[in-house]
Image (cartoon, rainbow, N blue to C red):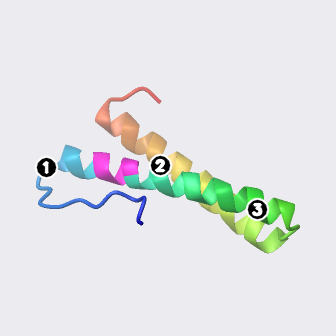
Amino acid sequence: QARVPIGKNITQDEDSVKLIVSSLSELLKIERDILEKSGEANDEGTNSMMSDFITEQEKTIWMMKAWLGETV
């Protein structure tokens, strides 16, 4: 079952950004799980890739929450 929320009939900019933040937040949870497992498996390639994804998505979430006027 999908954990990332699906948006339907979203027409307002604020609702779109909230959906993106929610989706990225769920992806971060999955990626952190992968990061943990790749660390346990000594898989440096996957570990590096997940670290890069997490860094960029955390920054994106921060920027979008700032745009929404939410405290981060």
As for residue 54 lying within the magenta part, the answer is no
Residue drawn at the location 84% of the way across and 69% of the way down: 44
Specify which label sits upstream in the sequence, 3 or 1: 1
Residue that appears at 36% across and 29% down:
70
Q: How many marks?
A: 3
Q: Nearer the viewer, mark 3 or mark 1?
A: 3
- x and y percentages locating residue 1 in the rendered image: 42, 66
Front residue of this view, candidates 52 and 19: 19
Residue located at (11% from left, 55% from top) = 11
Q: Which mark is residue 12?
A: 1
Q: Would residue 26 be visible to someone looking at this image? A: yes
* Farthest-out residue, right: 42
Name above or below for residue 47 compared with residue 10: below
Residue at mark 2 to residue at mark 1: CA–CA distance: 20 Å
Tag 3, which secondary structure?
helix
Q: Are marks 3 and 2 in contact (CB under 8 Å)?
A: no
For badge 2, the amino acid type reads Ser
* Residue at the spot of label 2: 25
The residues tagged by marks 3 and 1 sit, at their Cα atoms, a distance apart of: 38 Å
